């Protein structure tokens, strides 16, 4: 039995992909802020990583770990704030 939508449920920031797995581009301003924030953090950490790798320093592991952490956090928030569960989709013919 279908349940009515919950009016207190948070609005989605991302729409699930029609084809494939995951979410596409943001559909709300909060999603865009998250996306650009992730991009800024990731690129900053990548620049630090490249600088430390050029010096041959073991400190390059710190920005590398930060990039992995930022990516995992971004994916987790994107999944939780999508309009549908993430699953493989073959198009609009959902059952």
Image (tube, grey):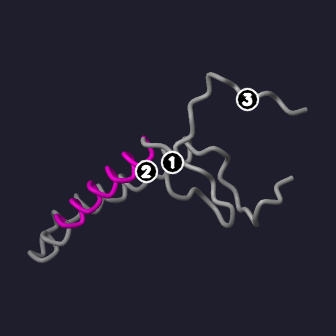
Q: Nearer the viewer, mark 3 or mark 2?
A: 3
Question: Does the stretch in magenta take in 72?
Answer: no
> Disc 3 and disc 2: Cα gap in Å?
26 Å
Most extreme residue toward the top is 8
Placement of 5 over or under 60, stated as above or below: above
Pick the front one: 53 or 84: 84
> Which residue extends farthest right?
1
Left or right: residue 89 versus residue 24 is right
Image position of 16 (left or right of 76): right
What is the tally of numbered marks visible in this picture?
3
State if disc 2 and disc 1 touch (CB < 8 Å). Answer: yes
Question: Which of pointers 3 and 1 lies earlier in the amino acid sequence?
Answer: 3
> Which comes sooner in the sequence, label 3 or label 2?
3
Name the residue located 91 percent from the left edge and 32 percent from the top edge.
1
Q: Do the residues labelled 3 and 1 touch (CB within 8 Å)?
A: no
Residue 36 relative to residue 14: left or right: left
Numbered circle sitting on residue 78: 1
User: Which numbered circle lies on residue 74?
Assistant: 2
Q: Is residue 60 above or below residue 95?
A: below
Q: Mark 3 points at which residue?
A: 5
Q: Determine the image quadrant of residue 50.
A: bottom left
Q: Could you tell me how far apart the alpha carbons at marks 3 and 1 are, in whole angstroms?
A: 20 Å
User: Dot 3, how many residues are within 10 Å of its Cα: few (below 14), some (14-19), or many (20+)?
Assistant: few
Residue 40 horizontal side relative to residue 68, left or right: left
The residue at the point 35 percent across, 52 percent down is 70
Please tell me whether residue 29 is drawn above or below residue 3 in the rendered image.
below
Q: Is mark 1 on a helix, strand or loop?
A: helix
Q: Is 90 placed above or below 41 here?
A: below
Q: Residue at x 29, y 55 (%)?
A: 66
Which segment did they paint magenta? Answer: 30-48
**Picture quadrant where residue 23 is located:** bottom right
């Amino acid at each position: 039995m279908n349940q009515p939508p919950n009016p207190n449920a948070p609005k989605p920031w991302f729409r699930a992909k029609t084809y494939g797995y995951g979410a596409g581009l943001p559909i709300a301003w909060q999603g865009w802020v998250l996306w650009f924030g992730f991009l800024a953090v990731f690129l900053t950490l990548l620049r630090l990583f490249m600088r430390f790798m050029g010096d041959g320093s073991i400190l390059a592991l710190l920005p590398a770990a930060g990039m992995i952490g930022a990516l995992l956090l971004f994916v987790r928030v994107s999944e939780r704030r999508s309009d549908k569960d993430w699953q493989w989709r073959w198009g609009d013919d959902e059952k």
